[in-house]
């Protein structure tokens, strides 16, 4: 089978297609024929060698995919060959035509959900859930600001916060992004590059400020975030690319908090809560992941470039399609013409 293999850290060009053995699922594993895998910002940091914890070379990246069950291990009981599924896993290896993962890391897709949408769930929705509920513990009626809300994590945050009864403001640097934010249910969509951004926030909230900010680029925005927090508010940092200087007095005056987090569940109990919440809402169609740009497998390096340029206009999850873009956009169980 074909897979993306990284043998050295560096520019997107290090993402190379190689012929590798097709995985044989272990007793408790499901083998998925991958029709789309998602590209996440953290994977660009790993590929570049700039992340704090780096994988051992060589490796195949990726955790998010949507596809069809190709084969099941002897002890698997919840899935059968032909099921339409997506992954919620911490295991790497999704940048490939076939991906073997534990049964516990696989969930069913809803009837109207495409494989590309399935590939847009994992990291983005897991991160959103942790930020809003496990870290910030938002309440119904809270003002929630999602910085960079037109991306995969941001859209998931909007859907979850609105479903929870929060009042949501999203930000994007483009008109297209702001239109998407409003379509997801936010009360307002602002340009975070505007000089009047902080004043607009204060006007919308009646001067009270924001109870929870989900921050995608802390090295740029954290100082501004602290100016617009409400009393006892919190900033949850899910993305950062450098350093920033802040005044701790900004935290002291309103007794606010800065919370750091990683994307994966910290313990089995949290994982169980998240998967139950996610599986129900995806299958019912309550959540509708948005796909941005789709690439064929041969253009995987371009997908990483697109992620890095995300704040210049891309909306939705960026995906790569090992068996062609047309198959990734399908909701059919049987995919023809892909052997």
Image (cartoon, grey):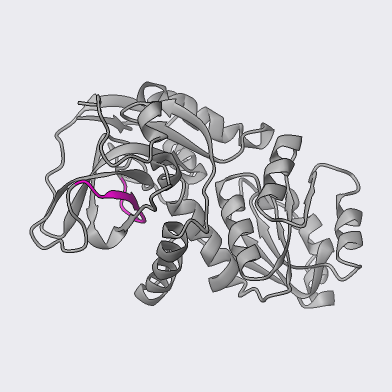
Q: Is residue 246 magenta?
A: no
Query: Is 2 placed above or below 232 here?
Result: above
Residue at the left extreme of this rendering: 74
Q: Which residues are magenta?
A: 82-92
> Which quarter of the image is occupied by the C terminus?
top left
Question: What is the quadrant of residue 115 in the picture?
Answer: top left
Residue closest to the eye, 313 or 107 = 107
Q: Residue 222: where, in percent of width, then height?
A: 73, 56
- Pinpoint residue 317: horizontal percent, then vertical percent: 52, 41
- Seen from the viewer's position, the closer of residues 232 and 55 is 232
Q: Main secondary structure of the magenta part?
A: loop
> Visible in this render: residue 12?
no
Residue depicted at x 26% and y 34%: 97
Residue drawn at x 43%, y 42% is 46
Q: Is residue 41 above or below residue 257?
A: above
Q: Quadrant of residue 185?
A: bottom right
Q: In x, y percent, where is residue 282?
A: 45, 57
Asked if the stretch drawn in magenta spans residue 85, the answer is yes
Q: Residue at x 43, y 53 (%)?
A: 122
- In-image side of 243 versus 291 (left or right): right
Q: Image check: 163 left or right of 204? A: left
Quarter of the rendering occupied by the N terminus: top left
- Residue 88 position, x and y percent, is 36, 56
The residue at 66%/76% (across/down) is 139
């Amino acid at each position: 089978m074909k897979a993306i293999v990284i043998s050295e850290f560096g520019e997107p060009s290090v993402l190379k297609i190689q012929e590798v053995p097709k995985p044989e699922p272990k007793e408790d594993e499901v083998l998925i024929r991958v029709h789309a895998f998602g590209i996440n910002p953290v994977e660009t940091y790993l590929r570049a060698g700039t992340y704090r914890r780096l994988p051992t070379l060589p490796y195949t990246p990726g955790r998010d995919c949507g596809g069809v069950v190709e084969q099941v291990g002897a002890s698997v009981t919840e899935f059968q060959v032909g099921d339409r599924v997506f992954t919620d896993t911490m295991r790497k290896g999704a940048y490939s035509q076939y991906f073997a993962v534990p049964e516990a890391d696989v969930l069913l897709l809803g009837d109207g959900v495409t494989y590309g949408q399935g590939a847009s769930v994992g990291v983005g929705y897991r991160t959103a859930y942790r930020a809003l509920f496990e870290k910030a513990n938002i309440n119904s009626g809270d003002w929630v600001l999602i910085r960079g809300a037109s991306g995969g994590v941001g859209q998931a945050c909007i859907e979850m916060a609105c479903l929870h009864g929060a009042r949501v403001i999203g930000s994007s640097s483009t008109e297209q992004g702001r239109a998407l934010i409003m379509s997801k249910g936010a009360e307002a969509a602002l340009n975070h590059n505007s000089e009047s951004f902080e004043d607009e926030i204060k006007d919308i909230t009646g001067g009270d400020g924001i109870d929870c900010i989900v921050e995608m680029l802390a090295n740029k925005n954290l100082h501004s975030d602290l100016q617009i927090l409400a009393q006892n508010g919190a900033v949850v940092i899910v993305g950062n690319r450098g350093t920033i200087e802040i005044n701790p007095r900004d935290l002291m005056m309103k007794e606010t908090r800065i919370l750091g987090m990683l994307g994966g569940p910290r313990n089995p109990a949290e994982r169980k809560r998240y998967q139950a919440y996610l599986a129900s809402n995806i299958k019912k169609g309550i959540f509708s992941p948005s796909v941005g740009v789709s690439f064929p497998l041969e253009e995987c390096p371009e997908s990483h470039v697109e992620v890095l340029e995300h704040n210049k206009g891309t909306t939705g999850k960026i995906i790569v399609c090992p068996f062609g873009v047309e198959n990734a956009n399908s909701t059919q169980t049987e995919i023809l013409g892909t052997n």
